[in-house]
Amino acid sequence: MPGGGNRCGLQPISLLQALATIILAVAAAAAAAWPALIAGTSSSTSRVAAANGTCQSRVAPFGYACEEHTVTTEDGYILSLQRIPSGRGETAAGGGGGGKVPVLLQHGLMMDGVTWLMNSPNESLGYILADNGYDVWIANSRGTVYSRHHTSLVSSDSAYWNWSWDELSSKDLSAVVQYVYSQAGQQKMHYVGHSLGTLIALAALSDQQQQIGMLRSAGLLSPIAFLDKMSSPLARAAADVFLAEALYWLGLSEFDPTGEYVHSLVTDICKQPGIDCYNLMSAFTGDNCCLDNSSVQVFLAHEPQATATKNMIHLAQMIRGGTIAKYDYGNAGDNREHYGQATPPAYDVTAIPGDFPLFLSYGGRDSLSDVQDVSRLLRALGQSHSRDGDKLTVQYLADYAHADFVMARNAGERVYAPLMAFFKLQEK
């Protein structure tokens, strides 16, 4: 059992209070999905979007070529990938990207690949990269709607959900990078991650040096690494009272913020006096400056996605402990069984080679990628990367919060243009 025994320390407080906090934290992570949950429309629109697929629902209607791919991880998860090999109205040379530089886009927690396609073609990174001559690949982590298949398990099996971001880094990212590298004619790729997508990259770069040989650079938007200064009150409360562990004890191995039970409880909670569900996104992610209604509606049609409860426990361990380490099984015996030592091994970001190019962009209003935590990460990276050279580029946007980096209407000029300039510098 994750966490082990009874060490999680939940007090016999009001079960209703605990459940209410659980639901608020889960649903807040679903961000703008609150209005749709209340209206009862999110589940149906999400099912329609899932049936259509990302290429059909979000890419082809705008005039882009789009290919659906799958890759199987070494532990049997069958992951969905979308490829946009050419710009709008452009014919992909040879049907394979025509020798273009590939870029791999990796979404964050409880999201999927639609993260990169939520705004118009002039505002979303997936389209912008394709229009600027890149061979775009969009990943979808295990457990999301397009990556729920497995060679021997079904998603209703608790064993299917026995993973955390350790496996997203060591298994999913590894398989996807190798697949894209092969499909792109062994061309090195740029990587872009948002939120949890940055954490799994940092872990892979520090722990799996073979991945570096297939990558040109990594762009990290709202970087997640150290989490002990996280200022989101809902995320901290959930971690401090071991709510993910409580869900696991209740037998919920899948952490699904759109499940029927959660939907019913959220509807009731949102009807209570003094509860403003529309403001919970800001309470969870920080005060996003630049979202508009159209991107929120796309979000509602596709997100949020399920993840493993074990993954949520792992993130809570990081918030409480202030370290970047592998999953803690809660006792020395289980840790020795998995790692050969009594405590989980740490990921050492200072081990990332100093000549590997990194672009970090973070926001002053971000409650999840807190400025203090990012500063600590930058100090660690500074041990190997000089800020005076071209291998570590850091961008700070005082008015940006967590969702702005993938949903803001002005992210094209404020984030993506500098990111592509960084890419071009590394391609010389």
Image: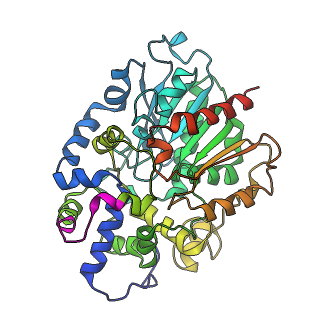
Relative image position of residue 176 (x, y in whole percent)? 54, 38
**Front position in the image: 322 or 395:** 395
Residue at 42% in and 19% down: 64
Relative image position of residue 172 (x, y in whole percent)? 51, 46
Relative image position of residue 403 (x, y in whole percent)? 45, 49
Q: Quadrant of the N terminus?
A: bottom left
Question: Magenta residues?
Answer: 268-280
Residue at 53% in and 70% down: 319
Tell whether 355 sits left or right of 282: right
Relative image position of residue 182 (x, y in whole percent)? 60, 28
Tell whether 304 sits left or right of 403: left
The reply to whether the magenta stretch includes residue 318 is no
User: Eyeballing the image, is 256 above or below 133?
Assistant: below
User: Eyeballing the image, is 48 above or below 280?
Assistant: above
User: Eyeballing the image, is 63 above or below 218?
Assistant: above
**Front position in the image: 47 or 204:** 47
